């Protein structure tokens, strides 16, 4: 059975998480359909010129995606399964060349328990489905984890105050990294 066939049979967020754990690898598909993973020495060097937001079909075919791509696969599943969810983008918003990673993540409201859940596959340090009694506590916890990651990059206290978090709508498939960021920064929070 192909990844696409298995994906279509997923019934719960827990099954989606298990599927992504088993079949998804962190990386990106270049404009020329080359696969870049963290093990690839050119991963970072080629990011700005080669990255483009993958389609659901590409993610399922190649089994690779950054957090940006993986959230779009998650968005697809949660939409198809009539689940209440939000997607968020975070970054350190500075006017000079940004040395810090960005991150996207999806949260959803559990239909049974009414808890808000942070669904995380792309971030190795925070993988899982994390449950919270409300959305504010979820956001606070996730932000704390993002700051911990940024401390590995020697972020200053002043720069921590420049972290932005934006809800965002579905971006266009095929967008470059620069286009993706600009699309989200230009969206109004709704």
Image (spheres, grey):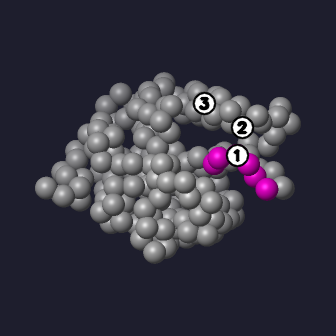
Tell how many labels: 3
- Name the secondary structure under disc 3: helix
Report the quarter where the C terminus lies.
bottom right
Q: As drawn, is 67 to the left or to the right of 145?
A: left
Q: Earlier in the sequence, mark 1 or mark 3?
A: 1
Instruction: List the residue tagged with mark 2.
Output: 153
Could you give the CA–CA distance between mark 1 and mark 2, rounded to whole angstroms?
7 Å
Towards the viewer: 134 or 145 = 145
Q: Residue at x 34, y 55 (%)?
A: 63
Q: Residue at x 33, y 45 (%)?
A: 20
Q: Image height check: is 70 above or below 50?
A: above
- Label 3 packing within 10 angstroms: few (<14), some (14-19), many (20+): some
SS class of the residue under badge 2? loop
Q: In percent of the image, x 54 and y 65: which residue is there?
A: 51
Q: Marks 1 and 3, Cα distance to the nearest angstrom?
A: 14 Å
Residue placed under numbered mark 3 in the picture = 145
Measured in 3D between alpha carbons, the distance from the residue under mark 3 to the one under mark 2, in whole angstroms, is 14 Å
Foreground: disc 1 or disc 3: 1
- The secondary structure making up most of the magenta span is loop
Locate residue 136, reporting x and y percent. 59, 31
Circles 1 and 2 in contact, beta carbons < 8 Å: yes
Query: Which stretch is magenta?
Result: 97-102
Return the mark for residue 100: 1
């Amino acid at each position: 059975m192909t990844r696409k066939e298995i994906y279509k049979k997923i019934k719960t967020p827990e099954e989606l998480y298990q599927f992504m754990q088993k079949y998804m690898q962190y990386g990106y598909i270049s404009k020329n359909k080359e696969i870049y993973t963290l093990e690839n020495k050119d991963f970072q060097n080629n990011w700005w010129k080669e990255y483009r937001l993958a389609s659901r079909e590409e993610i399922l075919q190649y089994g690779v995606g950054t957090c940006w791509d993986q959230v779009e696969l998650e968005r697809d599943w949660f939409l198809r399964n009539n689940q209440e969810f939000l997607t968020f983008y975070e970054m350190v918003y500075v006017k000079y060349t940004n040395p810090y990673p960005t991150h996207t993540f999806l949260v959803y409201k559990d239909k049974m328990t009414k808890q808000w859940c942070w669904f995380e596959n792309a971030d190795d340090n925070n993988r899982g489905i994390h449950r919270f009694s409300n959305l504010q506590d979820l956001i606070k916890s996730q932000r704390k984890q993002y700051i911990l990651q940024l401390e590995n990059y020697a972020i200053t206290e002043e720069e921590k105050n420049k972290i932005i978090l934006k809800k965002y709508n579905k971006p266009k498939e095929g967008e470059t990294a620069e286009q993706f960021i600009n699309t989200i920064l230009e969206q109004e929070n709704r």
